[in-house]
Image (cartoon, rainbow, N blue to C red):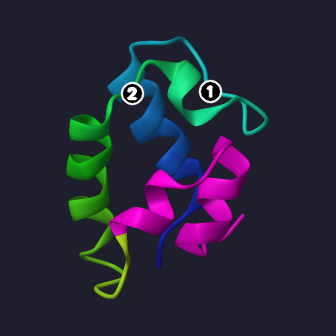
Amino acid sequence: MIRAADVLEQLRLASGLDSVDPAEELFDLGIDSVRLMRLTEGWRAERPSLDFAAVAGAGTVAELLDVLGAER
């Protein structure tokens, strides 16, 4: 199971920011496609069918949480 709190922490660490708000635009966090691909590989451990195009298509962090089916 993918937890929203875990995803937010992973995004915070990947971005180097102090915090990540679900309303923020994903790419405004400074996470490039290579980092996003690495994060996606980790999430696939919990959800093997996860599609990178769907992850990359998420506009906001909240939309990403929806794509991941993250428990909030």
What amino acid is labelled 1 in the image?
Val
Answer with mark 2 or mark 1, whichever residue precedes in sequence.
1
Q: Which residue is under mark 1?
A: 20
Tag of residue 49: none
Give the residue furthest to the bottom: 49
The residue tagged with tag 2: helix, strand or loop?
A: loop
- Magenta range is 52-72
Q: Which amino acid does label 2 sit on?
A: Ile
Determine the image quadrant of residue 14: top left
In the structure shown, which secondary structural element does the residue marked by tag 1 occupy?
A: loop
- Percent x, y for residue 17? 49, 12
The image shows a total of numbered marks equal to 2
Residue 41 occupies quadrant: bottom left
Please give the name of the residue rendered at 79% of the width and 35% of the height, measured from the top-left corner: 23
Q: Residue 31 carries which label?
A: 2
Q: Residues within 10 Å of mark 2 (few under 14, many from 20)?
A: some
Front residue of 10 and 39: 39
Q: Main secondary structure of the magenta part?
A: helix
Mark 1, Cα crowd under 10 Å, few <14 / some 14-19 / many 20+, is: many
Q: Which residue is drawn at 43% across and 18% down?
A: 30
Mark 2 vs mark 1: in front:
2
Give the residue displayed 71% in from the left and 29% down from the top. 24
Examine the structure image and report whether residue 19 is included in the region drawn in magenta. no
x%, y% of residue 16?
39, 13
3D distance between C-alphas at marks 2 and 1: 12 Å
The quadrant of the image that shows the C terminus is bottom right
Q: In this view, does 33 lie above or below 49?
A: above
Left or right of residue 63: residue 7: left
Up/down of 48 relative to 18, above or below: below
In the rendered image, residue 2, in percent from the top left (x then y), is placed at 48, 70
